């Protein structure tokens, strides 16, 4: 069998070493959100000069709990407004851009389809077009979703070469964003000296500090903190669950490879859990309530709502074989860390310090793999 050559050999510690990121100018759109806040914490811990552009943070959010605003240049603005995006990009003069800003919820997209498409599709156009006029920009990483794939509800995991699609407005908007990213990559970011552009698709990311409505783990945490039994809407749906740091670590690796001139990295990438961590909803609920010491969960008598996918898996062989990325925390460890974070904050622990401890613990395990 022909040996697979890892093209990142020689990059060393790619994505997780502070030396590359120290002093590097980084723009994050959507930095007030759950993933954006964790990414901001990680990059500022490594010494990056981070500017963030996003809507105001929710009152209860990781951004506020961990004091993220004090760590970076914070710009409030809407990516649906091109002038706002252009001004923020010119002010930041980024060397690396992470585009995370989005309307991120499937069920909400049925209520606000126009807002969802305007943010996720036209907002992506605005960010990419503004990036065309930035001198010194090296890398752009656009975060979309595993739901960008045309989901046929089959048991096989989706590869990066599978077609984009989407049943609900959220999924369709992410599929459309992928087409836009590919178009900009071929049309504007393919010349010598131009920034390199990649898209990244993660599974269902979970972690401490996620308070979004209509998401499984935040809904369970809110219930157990209040002393109530969580209500689980679709216990048999299967998703690729992973801790948020697993996905973000992959994004950082891609960004570093792009910035160092790796043309092969300018492509679409999946970052998902190990095969045995793609589990049904009831598996997650059972373990969180057990880890917390709560009494259990219930299912509503009537489940009424719009279509949601029942099964979705990602094939991450490309990231493993070409990038050298692999999950460091199994799903059991991820759930334990979520409970640790929320229990700690509920008992008065400093959210920023606790987040930094978890970041350090994750990086230690990843770098040993």
Image (cartoon, rainbow, N blue to C red):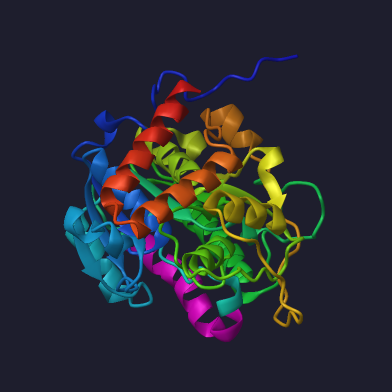
Q: Please indicate, yes or no, whether residue 189 appears anywhere in the rendered image.
A: no
Q: Position of residue 13 (x, y in %)?
A: 39, 25
Q: Nearer the viewer, residue 285 or 19?
A: 285
Q: Is residue 310 above or below residue 255?
A: below
Q: Is residue 273 above or below residue 310?
A: above
Screen quadrant of the N terminus = top right
Would you identify the image quadrant in which residue 236 lies? Answer: bottom right
Q: Nearer the viewer, residue 238 or 268?
A: 238
Q: How many marks can you see?
A: 0
Q: Would you say residue 25 sits in the magenta stretch? A: no
Would you identify the image quadrant in which residue 365 lies? Answer: top left
Q: Would you say residue 117 sits in the magenta stretch? A: yes
Instruction: Please indicate whether residue 92 sits to the left or right of residue 182 in the image.
Output: left
**Farthest residue, direction right:** 154
Q: Position of residue 50 (x, y in %)?
A: 23, 51
Which residue is located at x 48 percent, y 70 percent?
226
Q: Which residues are magenta?
A: 109-130
Instruction: Please indicate whether residue 268 sits to the left or right of residue 19 in the image.
Output: right
Q: Please indicate, yes or no, whether residue 153 appears anywhere in the rendered image.
A: yes
Q: Position of residue 82 (x, y in %)?
A: 32, 74
């Amino acid at each position: 069998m022909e040996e697979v050559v890892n093209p990142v050999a020689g990059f060393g510690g790619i994505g997780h070493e502070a030396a590359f990121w120290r002093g590097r100018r980084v723009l994050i759109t959507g930095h007030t959100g759950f993933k954006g806040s964790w990414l901001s914490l990680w990059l500022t811990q490594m010494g990056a000069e981070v500017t963030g552009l996003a809507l105001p943070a929710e009152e209860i959010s990781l951004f506020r709990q961990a004091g993220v605003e004090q760590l970076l240049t914070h710009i409030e603005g809407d990516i649906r407004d091109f002038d706002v995006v252009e001004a923020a990009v010119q002010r930041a003069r980024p060397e690396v851009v992470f585009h995370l800003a989005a309307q991120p919820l499937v069920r909400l997209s049925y209520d606000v389809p126009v807002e969802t498409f305007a943010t996720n599709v036209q907002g992506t156009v605005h960010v990419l077009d503004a990036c065309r006029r930035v001198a010194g920009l090296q890398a752009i990483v656009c975060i979309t979703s595993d739901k960008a794939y045309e989901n046929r509800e089959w048991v096989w995991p989706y590869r990066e070469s599978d077609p984009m699609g989407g049943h609900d407005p959220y999924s369709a908007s992410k599929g459309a964003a992928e087409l836009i990213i590919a178009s900009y990559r071929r049309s504007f970011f393919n010349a010598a000296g131009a920034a390199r552009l990649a898209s990244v698709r993660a599974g269902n990311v979970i972690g401490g500090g996620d308070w979004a409505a209509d998401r499984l783990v935040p809904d369970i945490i809110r219930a157990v903190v209040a002393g109530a039994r969580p209500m689980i809407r679709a216990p048999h749906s299967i998703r690729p669950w992973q801790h948020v740091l697993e996905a973000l670590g992959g994004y950082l690796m891609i960004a570093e490879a792009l910035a160092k001139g790796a043309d092969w990295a300018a492509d679409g990438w999946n970052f998902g859990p190990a095969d045995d961590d793609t589990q049904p909803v009831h598996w997650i609920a059972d373990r969180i309530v057990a880890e917390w010491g709560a009494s259990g969960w219930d299912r509503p008598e009537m489940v009424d709502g719009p279509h949601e996918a029942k099964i979705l898996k990602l094939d991450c062989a490309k990231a493993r074989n070409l990038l050298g990325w692999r999950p460091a925390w199994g799903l059991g460890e991820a759930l334990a860390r979520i409970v640790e974070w929320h229990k700690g904050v509920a008992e008065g622990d400093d959210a920023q310090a606790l987040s930094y401890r978890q970041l350090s613990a994750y990086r230690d395990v990843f770098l040993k793999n």
